[in-house]
Image: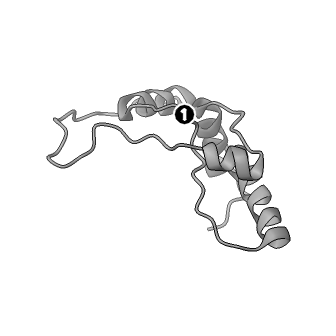
Amino acid sequence: MKDLAEAHTLGMAHLLKNGGRHQVNLGTRDGASVLEVIRICERVTGVSLSLDIALRREGDPPSLIANNALARNLLGWAPTRSLEDCIRDAWLWHKSDFRAE
């Protein structure tokens, strides 16, 4: 989540300085399967999830990976944290008393 906050701050600064309108992917350029994300969530939270694994649905793409080249070039931004770091940050925020309800 911290990477995203930093990217949004850089994006706002860019827009205030230069104007314009841009759509920028903020991905890592590295993909993760749904199962990998679930396993990281289990490790971070300590909660074991019950899974119902099924075949991919017709029409589902085999993979989706965000290309962050525009964010790198336009904003000078690149992710510095791992997917596990991001999930841990989100989990800590979710458990905190400081989140908006």
Frontmost residue, 81 versus 70: 70
Residue sitting at 36 percent across and 30 percent down? 35
The picture places residue 37, in percent across and down from the top left corner, at 45, 33
Q: Residue at x 70, y 44 (%)?
A: 72
Q: Position of residue 15 (x, y in %)?
A: 77, 69
Residue at 28 percent of width and 37 percent of height? 62
Residue 40 location in percent, x, y?
50, 28
- Is residue 89 shown to the viewer in this render? yes
Q: Nearer the viewer, residue 97 or 64?
A: 64
The picture places residue 14, in percent across and down from the top left corner, at 79, 63
Element assignment for label 1: helix
Residue 1 seen anywhere in this rendered image of the structure: no
Kindly indicate the quadrant of the structure image that contains residue 18: bottom right
- Local packing at callout 1 (Cα closer than 10 Å; few below 14, some 14-19, many 20+) is few
Question: The residue under label 1 is which amino acid type?
Answer: Thr
Point out the residue furthest to the right here.
17
Which one is nearer the viewer's eye here, 18 or 59? 18
Q: Quadrant of residue 98?
A: bottom right
Report the side of 56 relative to 80 (left or right).
left
Residue beneath the point at 34% across and 37% down: 63
* Residue 88 appears left or right of 18: left
In the image, residue 42 sits, relative to residue 8, either above or below, namely above
The scheme the figure's colours follow is one colour
Residue bearing mark 1? 45
The C terminus is located in which quarter? bottom right
